[in-house]
Every structure is written in C-alpha cells, then in structure tokens.
Amino acid sequence: MATMEDMSRKRTYWDIEAKIEAGIIKNEPDGSGARSSDSGAKHPKLPNFQDGRDDLDISLTRFERFAESNGWSREKWSSSLCALLTGRALDCYGRHSAEQAKDYDKKLLCGMDNVVDYIDDLLVHTEIWEAHVKTLSELFKRLQEANFTVRPVKCLLGSRTVDFLGHSLGRGAIGLQDENVEKVRDAPRPQTKKEVRAFLGLVGYYKEFVPNFAAVSAPL
C-alpha cells in the first residue's frame, strides 16, 4: 500500500515533469533543473487582497467620519457604498429581510381577504367571475402603485384549477399533485437514519391527507 509520503513524492515528480514540458523549468547541462529566465513574464505575480486592505480600511474610516460630520444619514449613503465596493454600482443593495417583506405584503394586501400570499406567490380565489375580475383589477392597481412587477409567463388567469405550493386547488377541493405523489411512490426504501428522516420529510408534506399519520409513521 502506498504511503502519503510516496503519493506526495509522485505528485511532485508529475508536477516537475509538467513544468519541464511547458518550458517553465529547463534542464541544465549538469543535470540540475533551473527555472526559465522568462517565467516571470509568463506567470506574473497575482495581486494580493491583503496588500490593499489597510488602505481600503483607512479610506472607509475617513469617508464615514466625513459623512457623519456633514450630517449625512447612514441609510442614504451606505447602500450606494456597498454597491460600489462590490463592483455593482448600478445595482445598489436595497433588499429587505423576510420579516420586512412579509409586513410590507400584509400592508399591500390589507382588506383583500380573497388573496393569499406566500413569499413572492399570490393566489386569488373567488366564487364568481365578476368578483374575480374586480379583485384582479384592484390587485394590479396596488402592485403598480407599489412599483411591483409580475412575470406574465408565471401568471395563470381565469383558471378553474391551479397548482399552488404542491397542491392542486379548484372546484371547491384541495388535492395532491400527481408528480409529487409519484415521487413518494417511487422513493427508494430508506436504509439509514438519514434516509428515514428524508423520507419522512417527503411524505410529511402531505400528512393531512393520511389518516393517523403520526401513528402510521411512528415505527419508522
């Protein structure tokens, strides 16, 4: 069995052979290897972030003190500075946390009881067509006023049935998506604890459709 030392020696040998073929190292008449004189030109030194980190920290500290002395609000300049430092000056950081986004959606959809929102998905449900059109008009109006956009390719309008969050909705019933049922049916038999947990997570999404799910899955 090869030891780690043998493997390291072989790796070093292959590395030297590759550099000789590439012209980085050349054999001298006495048999010793010497680095090619033009290797520096072929392989320039890579820049090191640490070389300029101190200067960057000093500049940022000076800018922050200058902004505070002039009474600039941190919220107004920090996002532009972050975008500048990441190289995306035209795409300033302005995203909200999940909690902030949820609160904003709640205010946006206030009073619209027949609209369900989940993160960035919206579901409109009504009993009659006239109410459906009225609700959509109000929803689009609010989205436009809030400068929100929707992707037409992901929209489904006026449908009697729709797939939403892994469920099939419509005609007064909530059902299962066939493709997800097939995943459960075709899932391999778990052999380890990790695979058992993964399988329970897979079937647990539909546990409300399985009578006594807790008792049935307890042996697993």
Image (cartoon, rainbow, N blue to C red):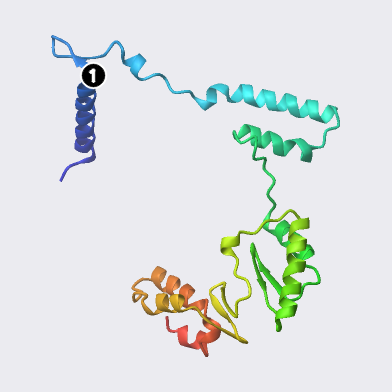
Q: Is residue 26 above or below residue 87?
A: above
Q: Is residue 97 above or below residue 7?
A: below
Residue 44, image x, y percentages: 39, 18
Residue 154, image x, y percentages: 57, 63
Q: What is the quadrant of the C terminus in the image?
A: bottom left
Q: Residue at x 24, y 35 (%)?
A: 8
Report the amino acid beneath label 1. Answer: Gly
Q: Residue at x 36, y 71 (%)?
A: 192
Report how many numbered discs are placed on residues in the image: 1
Label 1 sits on a secondary structure element that is loop
Q: Nearer the viewer, residue 28 or 40?
A: 40
Residue furthest toward the left?
30
Q: Nearer the viewer, residue 8 or 173?
A: 173
| Quadrant of res 58 | top right
Is residue 103 visible to us here?
A: no
Is residue 20 visible to us here?
A: yes
Residue 75, image x, y percentages: 77, 41
Residue 105, image x, y percentages: 73, 62
Q: Nearer the viewer, residue 57 or 46?
A: 46
Residue highlighted by disc 1: 23
Q: Is residue 198 above or below residue 149?
A: below
Q: Residue at x 57, y 72 (%)?
A: 165
| Quadrant of res 181 | bottom left
Q: Is residue 132 left or right of residue 172?
A: right
Q: Is residue 71 left or right of residue 45?
A: right
Q: Residue at x 50, y 77 (%)?
A: 204
Q: Is residue 120 left or right of residue 183?
A: right
Q: Is residue 174 above or below residue 31?
A: below
